[in-house]
Image (cartoon, rainbow, N blue to C red):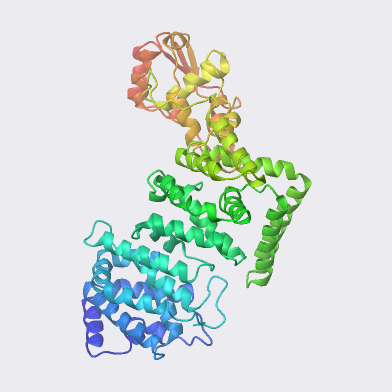
Amino acid sequence: MKLKTAFLFLLMSIYMPFFKTFIPDLDELDLNTQKLNKSLKDKINRQWKDVFDQTTLLQLYSSLIKELRLFREGQSQPAKLYYFLQLFSSSDYKVIFDKKSHHALLTHTELLESEIEQLLLETNTQLIQNPTPAEDGDLREMVSDLISLYFCHPSYHSEGYDDLKRIGGNLAFKFLRTYPYQDTSNLLISLLPSASDPLEQYTQLINDIVCSEQNDENRDLLLYILVSEMIGFYTEKSDLLYKKSKEVLKILSTHIPHWSEEQLDYFITQGILNGYGIYPTPKTKIAEIKGYIKKLNEGNYNAQVIKKRVKEYNQEIANIENDPIAFINAGYNKAAKILMVKNNTITFLENLSKLTPDSKTKVHLDQLIAQTLALKNTPKVFPINKTPKIKFSDLHFKLLVIEELMYKKNLLTPKFDLTQFIAQYHLREIDKEQEGYEVIPEALAYFKGLDISEELLAKVTSLTQDCGVDGGADVYAQIWPFWDPGCGDEVLKVSNKASKDLPLLPNLQQVIGLEHSNPSKKLISSFKERQIQLTEQDV
């Protein structure tokens, strides 16, 4: 490996052409007849792992900046530069560079930033012919990859990290102002909060989009992305834009009075309601789906994939047309369920409603707020308790107790029902049909925190661990809906920790089926010491 590095450095010292030096496989590629496929990308990746150290990365960045200058002067190979940056800016290869790339980027950032700003002044041009459906193959996409270096290459906690992210964020805003209504990399969106004065720039960008006269799906998508990054379904409490959403709306409120009724309607409908999956006019969603079908048919996709997706889309359209009211209500219900725990989002929506004149759009916004608050304030039948008064050391042993008291003797209430639990659970969407082939963590967490009084524990005289021969335990149907011993699913095994729980059950006389847990001699002894009979289950 040292010989390869030395050889590469020697090549650079006598200055060979950029592509021949760093990516000979790409240099030899005939782009008229060949594509940079996954196999070649992986090969280049392996080569980079062998030869890239801090010295070569410094030289690479230096050579890259020279190559960008040559590109602007019309003396480079645009297609190969495009593909190189596609590889170099990919987060797939971040592990190769780590802190080495951070230092190289930090050293060259002033020159690189200048080159990017120069490229943002250029007219967008096509760099590769016949791009794949996943590529645009133009200057815009190449500049996007260059800015993405500020996302992928900085190393957290390293010197200058915040400065690099700030520069990346500022460049990302400039990029979006230059190419506002074209497909935008998520990496660039992720850089925005790191920019200088991000709230001012973010708000101005939203205002520009709302006030634009351009009317196409890329404009719609960018507005959706920007609003979602701030108050969307998947925002986290630690996200800057979520934490500062109130301040963003305060700045935005200086623009809203200047918006027309149509522009305000667009912001609320496209940026918020549709973003949450709420379509007060179902025809809008149908038109959106038909757009997806058109793209599929026009793209260079596998015929079987197209056929399958078109069939699914047509079924979705049929469902909407058959019951549009149910479709609308389902959108409100799903959104309210997710938003009910997002206090900042609720505050944003309430304050936005106050800024909104009476209109049909305001009615829809207020309906969302009302349903969210109603759901938020509804007492939960099955709240997850994190601090039970009586704690079991072995959760699987506790499940045997719950089976006895809740499902056999009907003494422990309310009787847990997974379907009802899922309907009220709001931290994420639980899909029973998809997730039921394994233990559903949230259902198990409910039983872990469930309080059982000493009085009820004293009523337990017998426990059974059913291997499935008698139909299986009812509690399993609630935490592991499709548990199937016939397909090899085993019981949740009781461990040695259960010996610490035996004092909680002063009247326990018998345990049936413990052999399904393959108990240790130590555990068996702990039962015998308390004169608790262990009986094998009849199978």
Q: Indicate left or right for 106 with 461 as reference.
A: left
- x then y, percent, for residue 505: 41, 12
Dividing the image into 4 quarters, which one contains the C terminus? top right
Taking the image as drawn, is residue 248 in sight? yes
Rendering quarter of residue 330: top right
Q: Is residue 429 above or below residue 477?
A: below
- 477 vs 18, nearest the viewer: 18
Whether residue 488 is visible, yes or no, is no
- Above or below residue 263? Residue 423 is above
Which quarter of the rendering shows the N terminus? bottom left
Where residue 422 appears, x then y in whole percent?
57, 34
Instruction: Please report the residue visible at 77 percent of the width from the left and 49 percent of the height from the top.
Output: 321
Where in the figure is residue 166, as x and y percent of width and height? Answer: 32, 62
Whole-percent x, y for residue 69 in the image: 34, 85
For residue 383, above or below residue 99? above
Name the residue nearer the viewer: 460 or 152: 152
Q: Residue at x 32, y 76 (%)?
A: 114
